[in-house]
Every structure is written in structure tokens, then in C-alpha cells.
Amino acid sequence: MSHFSLSRRQARECALQILFQLDINPAPVIKDAIDAFWDQQVASRADEIKDTTGFTVDPTDTQALAAVLASKGVREFVTHLVYGVCENLRQIDGRLAGYTPNWSLNRLGGVERAILRMAVFEMFHGKATPHKVVINEAIDLAKCFCSLESGRFVNTTLDRALKDAPPLIAKPRAERRARPR
């Protein structure tokens, strides 16, 4: 069964959508929110899936449908980001409060808040993505989903965070190649 090829950037977009949804409508079980997201993606793209892959969409087979939309590695990355932000939310928000001294987190737009939370999680708890890549991805997401001004705000905020972020430990070259995309 073939699948659409989602990049890590698109995986971050998926995680952003789930985190935004959880911010405005908290779910008691995070897995349910993630499953609902993939269900919505499948429902909205059912015709495209069928036309592109020849796969007949069975609405009851959520796992198979999600596999058509995104590889296992992409879905795992989305899940990692969402759980990581949710499980470390208090610590992440505490850090963000220090990096945005003139803005309360409630004053930020929901999308900007989700982007910043995800980026801070990756910078402080991630082990694979270079900090500058995380910052660039966050800026691009802010410019795409918000405004140019949001991109600047995200850049300024994450530049402040970068000063406190722990350095990444470089993985051996062979291990980097083996990472699923």
C-alpha cells in the first residue's frame, strides 16, 4: 500500500493543528485527539486517496487509512511532538513566560502559542533536530499560518530560548542515516 509522502515540515504542521485543537478544546485522552485528527484528514481527503493510490477507503480501518496518508515514521514524529508538548506543558509555558516578558501566554494567538510550545519542546527535550532548523521551521509555520509579524515574534522569542537550550549531542553518521523520515 502506498502512502502520501509527508515531510517533517508537514508533520510539524499536523502536530501544530492537533496542539491548537487541544489548546482550545482539551481532550481527556491525547491519543483520542490524535486519532480524531487522522480520521478528519482521511475523511477530507478520501477521494484524493482513492484517486492517487487506488486504495478504497474503508472508514472503519483508521490505522490503514492513516498509513495511506503518512508513513509510520511521520505519524510517530507527530505523536512524539504532541505528547511531548502536552506532558511538558507547565515547564514549556514557564520557559515561554521568561522569553516573552511583555506578553502573557494568554495574550498570544493560539497558533503562535502552539508553534512556540512545539519549538521549545524540540529545543529543550529533542535530541535529533538542530536548534536552528527548529527555529526556521517555527518561523515558517508562523509566516504560513499567521502573519509576517508573527514570524518575527517567533524568531525573537526562540532566539532568546536558544541561549538557554542545551547543545545537541551529535549522532554518529550511520545512525543519522538510519532515522526514519
Image (cartoon, rainbow, N blue to C red):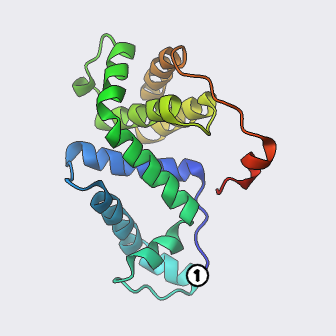
Q: Would residue 103 be found to the left or right of residue 148 on screen?
A: left
Q: In which quarter of the image is residue 115?
A: top left
Q: Would residue 165 be found to the left or right of residue 178 on screen?
A: left
Quarter that holds the N terminus: bottom right
Q: Which amino acid does label 1 sit on?
A: Thr
Q: Nearer the viewer, residue 88 or 132?
A: 88
* Above or below, comparing residue 103 to residue 175 in the picture: above
Q: Residue 14 placed where, x, y %? A: 44, 53
Q: Residue 62 placed where, x, y %? A: 38, 76
> Residue furthest toward the right?
173
Q: How crowded is mark 1: few (under 14 residues within 10 Å), some or many (20 or more)?
A: some
Q: Can residue 147 be seen in this view?
A: no
Q: Nearer the viewer, residue 79 or 24?
A: 79
Q: Name which residue lies at 39% across and 33% down.
A: 117
Q: Name which residue lies at 62% across and 23% down.
A: 167
Q: Can residue 43 be seen in this view?
A: yes
> Residue furthest toward the top?
101
| Secondary structure beneath label 1 | helix
* Above or below, comparing residue 169 to residue 76 in the picture: above
Q: Residue 73 placed where, x, y %? A: 57, 60
Q: Would residue 130 be found to the left or right of residue 79 on screen?
A: right
* Above or below, comparing residue 81 to residue 68 in the picture: above
Q: Name which residue lies at 45% across and 25% down.
A: 154
In the rendered picture of this protein, how many numbered marks are placed on residues? 1
Quarter that holds the C terminus: bottom right
Q: Which of 44 and 84 is in front in this view?
A: 84
Q: In which quarter of the image is residue 169?
A: top right
Q: On the image, numbered disc 1 is attached to which residue?
A: 53
Q: Name which residue lies at 45% across and 80% down.
A: 47
Q: Residue 37 placed where, x, y %? A: 35, 62
